[in-house]
Amino acid sequence: MLKWLFFKNKLSMRPSKRANDELRPIRIERNYTMHAEGSVLISCGNTKVLCNASVEDRVPPWLRGKGQGWVTAEYGMLPRATNTRNGREAARGKQGGRTLEIQRLIGRSLRAIVDLSALGERVITVDCDVIQADGGTRTASITGAYVALYDAVESLLKNNIIKKNPLHGSVAAVSVGIYNQQPVLDLDYPEDSQAETDMNIVMNDGGHFIEVQGTAEGHAFRRDELNELLDLADSGIQQLLYAQQQAILNKS
Amino acid sequence: MLKWLFFKNKLSMRPSKRANDELRPIRIERNYTMHAEGSVLISCGNTKVLCNASVEDRVPPWLRGKGQGWVTAEYGMLPRATNTRNGREAARGKQGGRTLEIQRLIGRSLRAIVDLSALGERVITVDCDVIQADGGTRTASITGAYVALYDAVESLLKNNIIKKNPLHGSVAAVSVGIYNQQPVLDLDYPEDSQAETDMNIVMNDGGHFIEVQGTAEGHAFRRDELNELLDLADSGIQQLLYAQQQAILNKS
Amino acid sequence: MLKWLFFKNKLSMRPSKRANDELRPIRIERNYTMHAEGSVLISCGNTKVLCNASVEDRVPPWLRGKGQGWVTAEYGMLPRATNTRNGREAARGKQGGRTLEIQRLIGRSLRAIVDLSALGERVITVDCDVIQADGGTRTASITGAYVALYDAVESLLKNNIIKKNPLHGSVAAVSVGIYNQQPVLDLDYPEDSQAETDMNIVMNDGGHFIEVQGTAEGHAFRRDELNELLDLADSGIQQLLYAQQQAILNKS
Amino acid sequence: MLKWLFFKNKLSMRPSKRANDELRPIRIERNYTMHAEGSVLISCGNTKVLCNASVEDRVPPWLRGKGQGWVTAEYGMLPRATNTRNGREAARGKQGGRTLEIQRLIGRSLRAIVDLSALGERVITVDCDVIQADGGTRTASITGAYVALYDAVESLLKNNIIKKNPLHGSVAAVSVGIYNQQPVLDLDYPEDSQAETDMNIVMNDGGHFIEVQGTAEGHAFRRDELNELLDLADSGIQQLLYAQQQAILNKS
Amino acid sequence: MLKWLFFKNKLSMRPSKRANDELRPIRIERNYTMHAEGSVLISCGNTKVLCNASVEDRVPPWLRGKGQGWVTAEYGMLPRATNTRNGREAARGKQGGRTLEIQRLIGRSLRAIVDLSALGERVITVDCDVIQADGGTRTASITGAYVALYDAVESLLKNNIIKKNPLHGSVAAVSVGIYNQQPVLDLDYPEDSQAETDMNIVMNDGGHFIEVQGTAEGHAFRRDELNELLDLADSGIQQLLYAQQQAILNKS
Amino acid sequence: MLKWLFFKNKLSMRPSKRANDELRPIRIERNYTMHAEGSVLISCGNTKVLCNASVEDRVPPWLRGKGQGWVTAEYGMLPRATNTRNGREAARGKQGGRTLEIQRLIGRSLRAIVDLSALGERVITVDCDVIQADGGTRTASITGAYVALYDAVESLLKNNIIKKNPLHGSVAAVSVGIYNQQPVLDLDYPEDSQAETDMNIVMNDGGHFIEVQGTAEGHAFRRDELNELLDLADSGIQQLLYAQQQAILNKS
């Protein structure tokens, strides 16, 4: 018994008892709401994000007449998605820097797998609204947003609004970090708030990088630590890409 | 067959085939999210509103040192809760007039059943966020918000933070209106957008009125029509109050 | 019993010594300012609102090319219209919830008596600015705004800009409430701030309802109380509609 | 007589037929509204400004504990005070540059005759709201604001809230300009919109300058033109200072 | 005694030891940055303002189709241009009243020497950003902005975009004031913050006035003081106009 | 083949003719403006950023009474720092997402080398204002901001305001990217706007990472490409750290 405990501790010092390279349970529910062309509730453990993809027949002013479309994202967090209530951004009268940064990241990540010309002169906006937060809301948003985008594109194809599939790959994201001196995958909030280094990695289904964002929260990190983190992220993202495909294969 | 259709048509001209005095199916899920002191997802047919009640140990500046608390509400709609996407209020930089009007109504309705002195110097904010909209989001918000408020108050009592229950009743709300020349209960969106008259009624468990808000959308309405609508609302609110009590009795 | 009631009415418990069913003195001055197509200063006792109706040859974007016009209202209060100074909304950078709620109410009330197609592709905006406040500013605004709108429409007819009168009725509004346990008509500020129930009623000249907005400030109100209040409002609005007609008949 | 009229007309090329050195009729009504400590409606011809002075027992943060008070002003224009409707600043979400410039000018002009230490730790805010505009609204505001400020100070003295009169003079303002190649006093809107040079002059009852603001609208102006304009302003301000004193001497 | 006074005047009582009629050293560097059509760093003593003139092929909405252009200015101050840090206006969410007032002044001053028809349907915006402040930033902005505007116009002429030079003169500005009971030219910050009277004068190369803005900071000023200040300003502006011409003559 | 590669590297395919691993000329001017406790103009080729460090004796509300200080940054770009004029953020009424993202990055990078407890209860704000932009403004800001921060801290030490140096290292940043299929160091604007991958790397003088931010602009990048980019960044940052030290050693 003691031995087993020791063994288990060796394997995991994480608050959630997960192994260092273990993702939280992931669940992807399609057609979660009724109006959006793509609507996905993604759960990564206790983090839950509703991703709604909306198709609109307009382009931003700077794209008018260019024969191509646009994919963008907006991000929000319900005031009590977190442990203590955060003031509503609409009431404060502006979106904070963190919100703007995250929604720019989601938009860039999605556009990296879209052929905007094949989309035609229309916009797909993916709204990522955090219903419940427990760390990793931006990476969960990207992973869920891809499936919502996929469904929105499918509806365009099915209705013969576009001929060619503008998606040329899939995309998923995960966080990695150094917690308690050890590289860990998919940080939850207790880990995230204590991590010395925090990285968000976005990759496509070809195994290549779309975004790499690493921040030293405590002390600076070394090149070998970076490499370990990238390895962890790679293995996690494989699983997330697989979960996306499974969700898509399930008829809905 | 023809007869049956005729009969059915007589019974209901409503798009949903409901009888004129028939509520949509109501579902109240408590403890829907993990952080809020009270968290309720209320579904009235396809209208779904997440009501999170948050307790904070502060009072607004104008109540400082007065020995009493405050109950307030905020309202929001996810951008794609509706049939076409609405711009995010946080991005537009302000809450619209409709939003402010609704959240003021929810707050007043809740305060009507709260003894603010018994609450002590703290604020309970109920965030009502519409996940999916199909008419009647403001009345669903009030009905759900009461249960969330109840749960938040229970947690204060259970933890001996307050001694006396500040709730001196319960509150629920429903819409009624004149659709197709007939008074109907609990309008869904197709009815709401065509209604000649639209009323929102808030009542307490004593059968008395807390708010009566009626608007002639088409032509003005007569006193006898008003009376019929109030009768319909009364019967609907009885059922909603009962549904609240059932939800509360179910251990969670 | 009857005698006692009579006696009670005679003495009045109202701060202003008015009978419970007595309006404040009403005065409607047309052509109050020189630029607006319709300009009315309405005084209900000490409440004074300047209502200016402006005609503009444009429609809001969502009405372009639909062959109809729009009638809307804006509401403001001078900073020292009230007993203590209120910060200027322009300086604070936004209109408050109360302001937005009131101007939406005024706009809806006016549109209820306008045939927007007959107006053609133009907008009439009625600005209701409270010069001095003593309760009932929103109902005074509606009653005064009708006369300003009437004058603006007359100028369009007189100048042959439109052929058919788009007004198909008149509209007036009054507040009623339960003060000191008694239903009273046309509350002034000392009553309004103490009232247990506060209602604003908008009716047309056919005696039908356009808006009914009742709020329980203290405890909830009963159906019979509601009925008494509606009776009071009805009698008050008859007098207001008459005052409007008298003002209009006076050449100006 | 006819000859003289002809002669007078020859002398005056002004749209209003006034002589070049002739003020518009001025009217100063005190106690115009009931709540403000000082409330003045000033009419300079068709320009009408309501000036309300409010006393508040607070000082701005940067004056706390300094044993002195503050006098400030805010300026606004009702949307239809002008010939065509101007959007409401509260609705647009900010005060324009012109508004800010004018209210800074009014505040400086008033402070020039106030001993802020004698005022004690309180603020007097004079709200100048233009009810009807026909040129010269900023100078009318200053002239009227002085009387409102005077009345507010009197109420402080009468109620023994302050002992020493903080006013050490009076202040009035007028516009002058070059219209039709001739220097004229007190421009109305038709002149103002055509003037080649436009000056606003603020002086105290000692005949000294508080503000001199001259702008070449068409071509630049010469030193001798400036001198003529200053002479005109001086004579006009004497009359305005006298009108203020007359208004104050009339018991109210 | 008399001699000593004479001697004192000669030595100057100004903190900078300048004579009362002495400008600070002026330096005008053209082509300061690489992108703007005109880019000037002007230094008046320690006050340094970067003036960038940008040509854009658009006109404001109210000038569309009128066959003329527009010249405007914007003004900003780097947060630590001053002795203590000022909050960034972009972060506060609006430009302050002082900023708006100054940029309106710069724009008017420049337009006074431009034939807007000769400019054609284009806008020249001169951005005046204060890098370091030591009093007189608005007058330095005008003096520098003229040279930036000159260079922008030259580039339009050289590239045959316009045929006729729209500049019909040059413009410069200086501050004068009463410091220590004496009229002085070109106040630096220590003087400006203590001055009893502060004037900003804008003149053209014909020796005529474009703007005269004088404010009594302490006590009101007399006509003879005004005249002395205007004389000082006139002599200072002659020198500034000469410095502009010298800067322009230096090939760059 | 090898020879050809060598030859190619020698000739360079970069618009600036730089070798792929060649920084632009760097220049660090200390004491650039007179008021700030640290004031540095950094030039990286044509990119010029003014970095002013301001010390203030206050802490943000959430740090009150915690016995530690704060280091933060703000970022801005003069409207015509770029090839075409960008609207002023202060005029638009808010800072854009890019601005907020950059200033958050600068602040985090600086805090990574500061012991906030040793700083005491004070804030150092580093304002990074881009005078001229040619790519790499955020990395130039970080590199320059360190020197400004160093000077501000030195002034605190010299004046005995703090005893212990709160800086425990130095920090610099550089961009790297894949341009024309080749990894290059320190991208200028023509490269940046065409790059397939764009990374910003922040490192300390221990050779460890503080931030790694890589974005695939065109197609996703491989792990080996990432490694090449990190090598390039490492060599560039060594040179930048050296340039900082040289600037500091030069007495000023």
Image (cartoon, coloured by chain):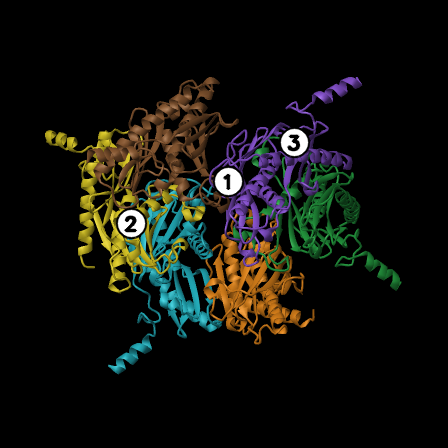
Chain colours: A yellow, B cyan, C orange, D green, E purple, F brown
When the figure is inspected, residue D197 is found, relative to residue C247, above or below; the finding is above
The residue under label 3 is E186
Same subunit, tags 2 and 1: no
The residue under label 1 is E89
What is the three-letter code of the residue carrying label 2? Leu
Report the front residue among E42 and E31: E31
- Which chain letter goes with mark 2? A
Report the front residue among C8 and E245: E245
Q: Give me the residue at 63% from left, 24% from top.
A: E16
What is the three-letter code of the residue carrying label 1? Glu
Indicate the quadrant where residue B195 lies: bottom left
Residue E198 point in image, percent of width and height: 67, 35
When the figure is inspected, residue D99 is found, relative to residue D7, above or below; the finding is above
Q: Split into 4 quadrants, where in the image is the N terminus of chain B?
A: bottom left
Residue A73 point in image, percent of width and height: 33, 50
What is the three-letter code of the residue carrying label 3? Asp
Q: Give me the residue at 34% from left, 74% from top.
A: B13
Helix, strand or loop at mark 2? helix
Distance between the Cα atoms at labels 3 and 2?
58 Å
The residue under label 2 is A110
